[in-house]
Amino acid sequence: MSNEFPLPSSHYAQLVGREIHWLDWGAPDAPVVIAWHGLARTCRDMDELAQHFATRGFRVICPDTIGRGLSQWSPLPDEEYQLSFYARIAGALCDELRLGRVHWVGTSMGGAIGTVCASGLFEPRMKARIASLTLNDNAPQLAQAAIERIRAYAGEPPAFGTVAELEAFFRTVYKPYGWLSDAQWRRLTESSTRRLPDGRVTPHYDPAMVRQFSAHDNDYLIWPHYDVIEAPVLCLRGAESDLVLPEVTQQMQQRGPGAAGLLKVVEIQGCGHAPALNVPEQLQLIEGFIRAAGR
């Protein structure tokens, strides 16, 4: 990818009573893509996607979910670390930026947030805003064994004496992302690292965010939301994913936007959970889908 790309502006606002951070890429009057990261990640995971779209006539908004990256940690984790509250934040962000129609690209949790926004069941005003929905290794039903795996490593984040050790950990746990350059692994590490009071480093998120799984049983079982989506949907499934199973994507084809002919499922070879969205083939695939969906 070319080294010549626009730099984002960084913003903070009080949304639903919490300080939320986001990066804003591209021209302010361009068609909008909202790119939302996964469960234990940050907005910086979307840098390559944002660079790609910002140089091709789009504006890209990349938020940090509450409890992740530079956004505020919730003082009420059992109440606020759940999809319905994330959808409220998404709606408030769109209001803050006066956004009309948007194309949503979400990795894992970010895809689930996009699904519940596109349904309008939590936030009715969001349904008409979602012009297209890209689910990056996310579906209305997730494999329980994979959820438990993610919950185990995310709920008790390790701490290391050096950033190099933390990078080695990230390279292991996120190996299913597929190919990343050394520079991308370093950026992933540095953009998701915080230092503890004892000087050690650990991933940059609130460990309490995994209480979503215990305080809100089946928060990610969202077929009722999927079934009422009327926007085009692109589902990217990591070919080796243990979270999104083939039988679930087959069921998606028979329900909701799938039954209406609005769903496209593509398996991404060489990836598990979840494709990093950092190589031309993946980015061009999403761009083609979004352009076909129109504004």
Image: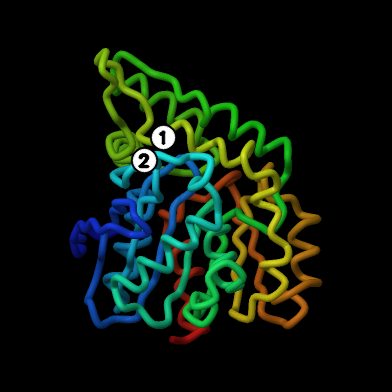
Q: Nearer the viewer, residue 69 or 13?
A: 13
- Quarter of the C terminus within the rendering: bottom left
Res 98 quadrant in image? bottom left
- Quarter of the N terminus within the rendering: bottom left
Residue at the extreme bottom of the image, as rendered: 294
Residue 79 in the figure: left or right of residue 230: left
Res 150 quadrant in image? top right
The vertical placement of 60 against 210, above or below, is below
Separation (CA) of disc 2 from disc 1: 6 Å
The vertical placement of 213 against 124, above or below, is above
Q: Mark 2 points at which residue?
A: 73
* Residue 123 disc label: none
Q: Which residue is drawn at 63% across and 81% down?
A: 230
Q: Which amino acid does label 2 sit on?
A: Trp
Q: Where is residue 239 in the image (x, y as percent from the top left)?
A: 66, 50
Number of labels in the image equals 2
Q: Where is residue 165 in the image (x, y as percent from the top left)?
A: 36, 19
Secondary structure under the numbered disc 2 in the rendered image: loop
Q: Where is residue 7 in the image (x, y as percent from the top left)?
A: 18, 60
The vertical placement of 182 against 229, above or below, is above
Query: Label 1 near label 2: C-beta < 8 Å?
Result: yes
Q: Residue at x 49, y 36 (%)?
A: 174
Specify few, some or many for label 2: CA neighbours under 10 Å numbering under 14, 14-19, or 20 or more.
Answer: many
Secondary structure under the numbered disc 1 in the rendered image: loop
Q: Mark 1 points at which residue?
A: 206
Q: Which residue is drawn at 37% across and 61% down?
A: 49
Q: Earlier in the sequence, mark 2 or mark 1?
A: 2
Q: What residue type is labelled 1?
A: Asp
Q: Residue at x 74, y 61 (%)?
A: 249
Q: Which of 171 and 39 is in front in this view?
A: 39
Residue 224 in the figure: left or right of residue 160: right
Q: Position of residue 206 (x, y in %)?
A: 41, 34
